[in-house]
Image (cartoon, grey):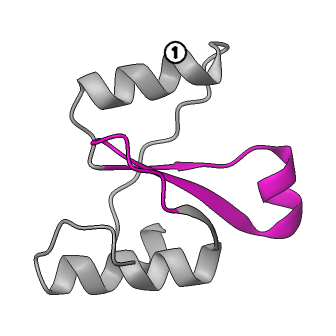
Amino acid sequence: MRTVGVRVDVDSRAETMNHKIREAQLSKIPFMAVIGDKEAAANTVSIRARSGAQPGVKPLAEFAEGMKRNISEKRLDLSL
């Protein structure tokens, strides 16, 4: 993600996934890319928005390009 110019922060603490997601929502992080063992094996990401919307699982390259496009157009929506 950094290679396409997206600011990222990896939360690798030993907390539950639900706890990490809740903290990210409270911190007003616009998008979360959840990558577990299944996603890592398939080179995909499970996307969540701060609003609670879950557009689903996408290939990592497609998500990265969508985020890059959103940043260049200064949009903040889920049309990744």
Instruction: Give coordinates of residue 8: x percent, y percent.
Output: 40, 52
Quick check: 3 above or below 72? above
**Membership of 36 in magenta stretch:** yes
Are there few (<14), some (14-19), or many (20+) residues within 10 Å of tag 1?
few
Q: Quadrant of residue 4?
A: bottom left
Q: Amino acid at mark 1?
A: His
Q: Residue at x 63, y 73 (%)?
A: 60
Instruction: Give coordinates of residue 2: x percent, y percent.
Output: 44, 67
Q: Secondary structure at mark 1?
A: helix
Residue 39 shown left or right of residue 76 in the figure: right
Instruction: Give coordinates of residue 44: x percent, y percent.
Output: 71, 67
Start and end of the magenta stretch?
31-55
Residue 50 shown left or right of residue 8 in the figure: left
Report the label total.
1
Residue 13 shown left or right of residue 3 in the figure: right
Quick check: 72 above or below 9? below
